Image (cartoon, rainbow, N blue to C red):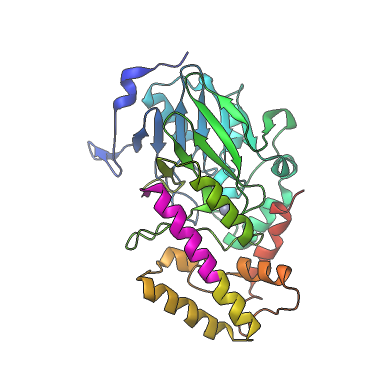
Amino acid sequence: MVDTADKRDRTVRWPITREGKEVIPISQVAQGIYAVGPLQSFPLSPNAPYLVVGNEWCAIVEPGDAHQPHTLLEAIKEIGVDQNCIRYIIPSHIHIHHCSAINVLLKEIPDSKVVVHPTAVRNLMDPTKLNQSTKGIFGVRTCPTLDPVPEDRIMPVRDGTVLDLGGRELEIFHAPGHATHHIAIFDHLTRALWPGDNISFNNVATKRGRVGIAAPMFDADAAVETFRRLRALHPSMLLSWQGSLAFYPADHYLHTAEDDLIATTDIIHEGMKQKKTAEEIQADIKAYHDSLGIVITEQEEYEQQGRIPVGLVNWLKKKYPELEAPAGMKGDTTRERNQQAISGETSAA
Ligand SMILES: [Zn+2]
């Protein structure tokens, strides 16, 4: 049984040091939901895995990357939960910084399973392509990798699957957009929602949601549909895998992410139709951002939000085969070629 009740009330903010030493950041963000982090991660921004505590069983949501599982297990001990109560490990999708912690976690928690959409199973069992393409994008030195996951440790879940933790249920929604195999996780008890990379970076200044549109298999129509489905759940909060960013109110972030995605897609589509150059389209996007006071952060620039996102252009070319990529678009750099390569991972059928 889970060691319940009082111990759950502690809230620790990060960064925090005790006697000169940094301690693990743990925050209770809702009843029985703990964010551990943000923990330092490989080149992308820090991850925050979550522990969800039920009366009988627990789940880890957004387990993070391979640098982090030991810290997470230590934090779980500190929260006062027996790790053997953890039944489910649920990454929103299997991009490497969301899931590569699972090898250690599955080993240390023998009765647990990793919960994914059925289209992600093949690439968990054989992650060769996923590892290669991720290393190609981020460099080999610090990039974590995923080891093959045995089939009997994978639990494929379809839209609407409910995981019963005892006294609380987590419902899984298929949430394509950022990736075809992407899922969102909804806690019935607190109405907290993990949207994964469907709501990626928070623009702190303007409080707008932002979908991760750099992904090579990005699908704008699917993303809009996902936003609408998730909004219909009336979530009380969005819990970001980046942890330090709390999304309140959820509806506003989902709404603005949808508005900005539709606007950006229209600008690029129109620009491609008029055969505008990449620079001209980029200026149009900037004008839209300026009109709303949206500031593109360095991190977002890195993630291509401030440029013409290759994922969105690829998607438009697929939808409208007569269109060509804008002239001058940096579509042939090593980084972007490798992003094309990663599509093998997300397009698993
Ligand atoms: Zn992703």
> Would you say residue 345 is visible in this rendering?
yes
- Residue 86 lies, with reference to residue 272, above or below; the image says above
Q: Is 67 placed left or right of 219 in the picture?
A: left
Please name whichever residue, 234 or 343, is drawn nearer the observer in this view of the structure.
234
Q: Residue at x 44, y 75 (%)?
A: 288
**Residue farthest to the left?**
19
Q: Which residues are magenta?
A: 245-264
Residue 269 point in image, percent of width and height: 61, 75
Please name whichever residue, 174 or 152, is drawn nearer the observer in this view of the structure.
174
Residue 180 point in image, percent of width and height: 67, 51
Please name whichever residue, 187 or 90, is drawn nearer the observer in this view of the structure.
187
**Residue farthest to the top?**
1
Q: Residue at x 48, y 63 (%)?
A: 259
User: Where on the picture, by quarter, is residue 74?
Assistant: top left
Q: Residue at x 75, y 74 (%)?
A: 321
> Would you say residue 304 is visible in this rendering?
no
Q: Magenta segment: does it hold 252?
A: yes
User: Where on the picture, by quarter, is residue 10?
Assistant: top left
Residue 313 point in image, percent of width and height: 64, 71
Q: How many numbered discs? A: 0
Q: Residue at x 60, y 57 (%)?
A: 140
Q: Main secondary structure of the magenta part?
A: helix
- Residue 306 lies, with reference to residue 121, above or below; the image says below
Q: Magenta segment: does it hold 235?
A: no
